[in-house]
Image: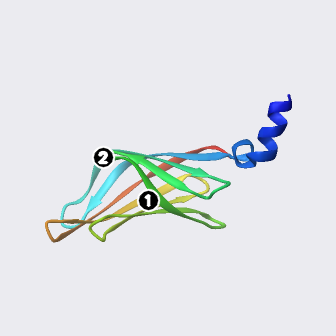
Amino acid sequence: MKFLRLAILFCPNLVLADTISFQCSFPMACQAEKGCASATFDLNFMMDTVTNESFVVGNNGLSSVQNYVGDAGITFVETLGTGAIQTTTIVWAGEAVHSRHTIILDDLVPSQYYGSCQRTGG
């Protein structure tokens, strides 16, 4: 019990930390000139409510993202080395859209995915 009190005193973030996760599934994809079609695309977001740090787990592993929390939902923004960005906006009811502004070989390849996210934790 004495160790627990010391941990709370000297490491309050370890004791008070809470993580919110969003498990997202996007069954519809749309691309310029190609139109919309069925897709299988999943992303998972994790946000530490104490440090306000967020991460996305996707096809390419774990990446740091910024989060913007509002009254109606949350948006995660990932900046890429190419200068492009990817955003995911989730309304609190669960509906979500993931937008990619990808640059491949100096060409812009935009796409948008539509789906929903389940929130856990927090």
Left-right relation of 69 to 6: left
| Position above or below: 47 against 89 | above
Left-right relation of 13 to 44: right
Residue where numbered disc 1 is placed? 97
Residue appearing at x 75%, y 48% in the figure? 12
Residue appearing at x 32%, y 45% in the figure? 59
* Residue 56 percent across, percent down from the top left: 45, 50
- Badge 1 amino acid: Val
As drawn, the residue found furthest toward the left would be 105
* Residue 52 percent across, percent down from the top left: 61, 58
Q: Residues within 10 Å of mark 2 (few under 14, many from 20)?
A: some
- Badge 2 amino acid: Ala
Q: Nearer the viewer, residue 73 or 86?
A: 86
Residue where numbered disc 2 is placed? 39
Q: Residues within 10 Å of mark 1 (few under 14, many from 20)?
A: many
* Residue 106 percent across, percent down from the top left: 15, 71
As drawn, the residue found furthest toward the top would be 1
Left-right relation of 28 to 66: left
Residue appearing at x 80%, y 32% in the figure? 3
Q: Quadrant of residue 87?
A: bottom left
How many numbered circles does the render carry?
A: 2
Secondary structure beneath label 1: strand
